[in-house]
Amino acid sequence: MFTPLTYAQLLHIAHRSSAVTHPCACLAKPFAGWEGLPVSIKESQLRETGSLIAAEEEDLTLDEYHPDGTSYWSEKAPIAPQFFPYNRCKVCECVDCSRVYLRYAEAGAYHIEQRIRSLDPALMVDVAFEGVGRA
């Protein structure tokens, strides 16, 4: 289990990841928004390097942060670590190219789907959950 990353640590990792320019098999899709983890990416290709999970699951909010009218699926949705689904994410790095992704398991009524999104520093926002209106 990893100690939750601070916003500053996550932002540093995001900038490092965005500087990677060479091609890699992990780029099967751009993963600009949330996607199901494709079978083209092998589980062994992504190594967990950190976590954004700062509490027990039942204590984590399901509220999302969309001040500009984006949605969960939007490629422009902000990455707000204290809000859903980011507060349930593991930080994973491609072992081949060092690009970094956010991952979590979406539990549906009849299945669990692994979701993945690129860690884009341009979309990151440092906003606390406390005192913020519901999105």
Image (cartoon, rainbow, N blue to C red):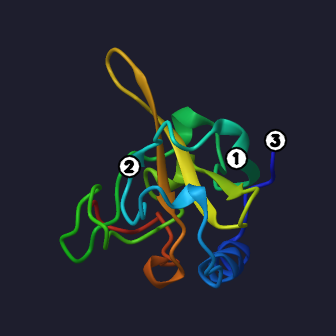
- SS class of the residue under badge 3? loop
Q: Count of labels shown?
A: 3
Residue at left offset 45%, top offset 47%: 61
Q: Earlier in the sequence, mark 3 or mark 2?
A: 3
Going by the numbered disc 2, the residue's amino acid type is Glu
Q: Which mark is residue 33?
A: none
Q: Which residue reaches farthest top?
A: 110
Q: Is residue 80 above or below residue 109?
A: below
**Front one among 9 and 122:** 122
The residue that label 2 is drawn on is: 35
Q: Earlier in the sequence, mark 1 or mark 2?
A: 2
The residue that label 1 is drawn on is: 45
Mark whose residue sits in front, 1 or 3: 1
**In which quadrant of the rendered view does residue 5 lie?**
bottom right
Going by the numbered disc 1, the residue's amino acid type is Gln
- SS class of the residue under badge 1? helix
Quadrant of the image for the N terminus? top right
**Could you classify mark 1 by the number of other residues whose Cα lies within 10 Å: few (under 14), some (14-19), or many (20 or more)?**
some
- SS class of the residue under badge 2? strand
Q: Earlier in the sequence, mark 1 or mark 3?
A: 3
The residue that label 3 is drawn on is: 1
Q: CA distance from mark 1 to mark 3?
A: 19 Å
Going by the numbered disc 3, the residue's amino acid type is Met
**Front one among 17 and 61:** 17
Whether residues under marks 1 and 3 lie with C-beta atoms below 8 angstroms apart, the answer is no
Quadrant of the image for the C terminus? bottom left
